[in-house]
Amino acid sequence: MKIFLSHKREDSYEANQIALHLAMLGIPYYLDILDSKVTDSGKELTEHIKKNLNDCTDIIVVISEATRYSQWVPFEVGMSAQKDMPTATFLKSNVLLPEFLEYWPRLKQPDDIGKYVAARREVQDEYEKRSLHYDFAQMYQSQTERFYDVLKRRL
């Protein structure tokens, strides 16, 4: 598991706090504010984001009032949705989510990061055990959907 942290620049503090929690849990992550190779060039930045997102297995999206003005957060969410990446939102405050983000689990406090990681590990273990006994074609519910069910119950 490696988590891509998507956020608007104004939400860098919260994204960094999530990164600290992930580091304490031993979970690798990508956070652009810690990446010296980030550029402002359109094509280069797009390729850089794509590469780093493709190197991750999950995405957590920091949501605030500023998010609605972001061009990159929707791009990152769209790319991750195409890959069926496990996705969660981290709500910076009581903010109304855009309709396209309401489906995913909502993290609201730092402790929820630990719940995310625990649910993700549990479902990964469950699917690894299943794969020993069943053909992959028989496993109807996607691992991502199962993860959402488990995490939403814990939040």
Image (cartoon, rainbow, N blue to C red):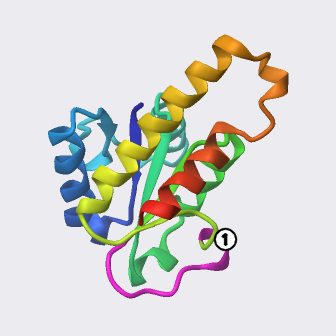
Residue 102 visible in the displayed image: yes
The spot of residue 39 in percent (x, y) is 36, 43
Is residue 104 found left or right of 16 in the rendered image?
Answer: right
| Picture layout, residue 115 above or below residue 4 | below
| Picture layout, residue 124 above or below residue 59 | above
Q: Quadrant of the N terminus?
A: top left
The type of residue carrying mark 1 is: Phe
Name the residue beneath numbered marker 1.
Answer: 100
Rendered residue at 19%/64% (across/down): 13
Magenta-tinted stretch: 91-101
| Picture layout, residue 136 above or below residue 73 | above
Q: Quadrant of the C terminus?
A: bottom left
| Magenta stretch contains residue 18 | no
Magenta span: chief secondary structure? loop
Residue 53 visible in the displayed image: no
Furthest toward the right, the residue is 137
Is residue 5 found left or right of 76 in the rendered image?
Answer: left
The spot of residue 2 in percent (x, y) is 39, 33
Q: Quadrant of residue 92?
A: bottom left
Rendered residue at 19%/39% (across/down): 23
Is residue 50 found left or right of 94 in the rendered image?
Answer: right
Rendered residue at 63%/46% (across/down): 146
Report crowding for label 1: few under 14, some 14 to 19, many 20 or more residues within 10 A (C-alpha).
Answer: few
The spot of residue 14 in percent (x, y) is 24, 65
Foreground of the two, 16 or 116: 116
Is residue 95 found left or right of 25 in the rendered image?
Answer: right
Q: Quadrant of residue 132?
A: top right
> Tag 1, which secondary structure?
helix
The spot of residue 5 in percent (x, y) is 38, 50
Rendered residue at 32%/46% (across/down): 32
